[in-house]
Image: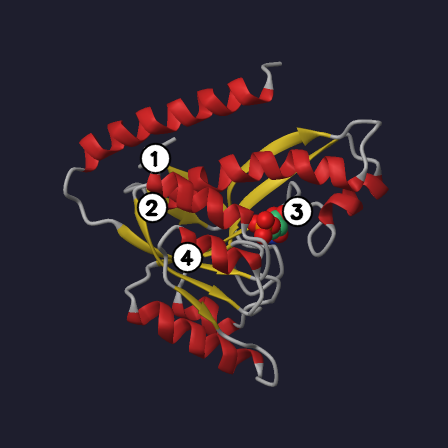
Amino acid sequence: MLPQNIEKLLLYSYRIARGAANRLRFGSMERAKIGILISGRGSNMVALLEAIRDGSLNAEAALVISNIETAAGLVKARDFGVETLFINHKNRIREDHDRAMVSELKKRGVSLVCLAGYMRLISSYFVREFPQRILNIHPSILPAFAGLNAQQQALDYGVKITGCTVHLVDEELDHGAIILQRAVDVLESDTVESLSARILVEEHKLYPEAVARVLSENFRVEGRRTFAKQALS
Ligand code: GRF
């Protein structure tokens, strides 16, 4: 196994090279606008913004919305120069809150919504407004361990392999068609913290790849199966 800093450097160089290749491929093609929904620290959001900044993800981050005013991710998004909004969900029925978010996303021409640690269910209204254009990242190999505390669920069950999944969002929790998954070994010495940290490293690689896949020309969904002949990664 490579030391972590060398692995990071290799990944960074790879992304720069891939970004340059993509810029040549796409030239002046208009970039898809993505919106990101968060509730907390936003490390997956940062992974997406970094991939956009280094050119490995051909998209534009148009807006980051949080339902929590103090979410650390809001500050991080602004550091990337991305517009942010706090839209409070308290004392509002779910659909009204979602209507407010959908309206802001549409005003900015967002065509793909990425949930990145957004800790609320979204309404059928939201799903209908962005058909097959909402993604979520979940820290398990779905359909195993949907819902909260997926890493703890994996430890409690005693699985030897878990991981992460990026999937389309439908009206059921952690259920829509799967875009990409990555496996992570569960070690005998693992605590929920150590396992979550190793899964998170994979999440940060997987989410930008999955977004690139969905934005690629040949991406299609057939039932629960998804296809992308020319994924960018
Ligand atoms: C991640 O583990 C993600 O899989 C789950 O919520 C966590 C969010 O972390 N949906 P972050 O806010 O992206 O750091």
Query: Marks 3 and 1, how far apart in space?
Result: 29 Å
In the rendered image, the vertical position of residue 54 relative to residue 4, given as above or below: below
Residue 148 placed where, x, y %? 72, 56
Of callouts 4 and 1, which one flags the residue occurring earlier in the amino acid sequence?
A: 1
Q: Looking at the image, do the residues carrying marks 2 and 4 touch, with CB atoms under 8 Å apart?
A: no
Amino acid type at circle 3 is Pro
Local packing at callout 2 (Cα closer than 10 Å; few below 14, some 14-19, many 20+) is: many
Judged left or right of residue 101, residue 183 is right
In the picture of the structure, the residue carrying the numbered disc 3 is 143
Mark 2 residue element: helix
Query: Marks 4 and 1, how far apart in space?
Result: 20 Å
Marker count (numbered): 4
Of callouts 2 and 4, which one flags the residue occurring earlier in the amino acid sequence?
A: 4
Of callouts 3 and 2, which one flags the residue occurring earlier in the amino acid sequence?
A: 3
Name the image quarter holding the N terminus: top right
Q: Looking at the image, do the residues carrying marks 1 and 2 touch, with CB atoms under 8 Å apart?
A: no
Of callouts 3 and 4, which one flags the residue occurring earlier in the amino acid sequence?
A: 4
Local packing at callout 1 (Cα closer than 10 Å; few below 14, some 14-19, many 20+) is: many
Mark 4 residue element: helix
In the picture of the structure, the residue carrying the numbered disc 4 is 78
Q: Nearer the viewer, mark 2 or mark 4?
A: 4
In the picture of the structure, the residue carrying the numbered disc 2 is 215
In the picture of the structure, the residue carrying the numbered disc 1 is 56
Query: Marks 3 and 4, how far apart in space?
Result: 34 Å
Local packing at callout 3 (Cα closer than 10 Å; few below 14, some 14-19, many 20+) is: few
Amino acid type at circle 1 is Ser
Q: Looking at the image, do the residues carrying marks 3 and 1 touch, with CB atoms under 8 Å apart?
A: no
Q: Nearer the viewer, mark 1 or mark 2?
A: 1
Outermost residue to the top = 1
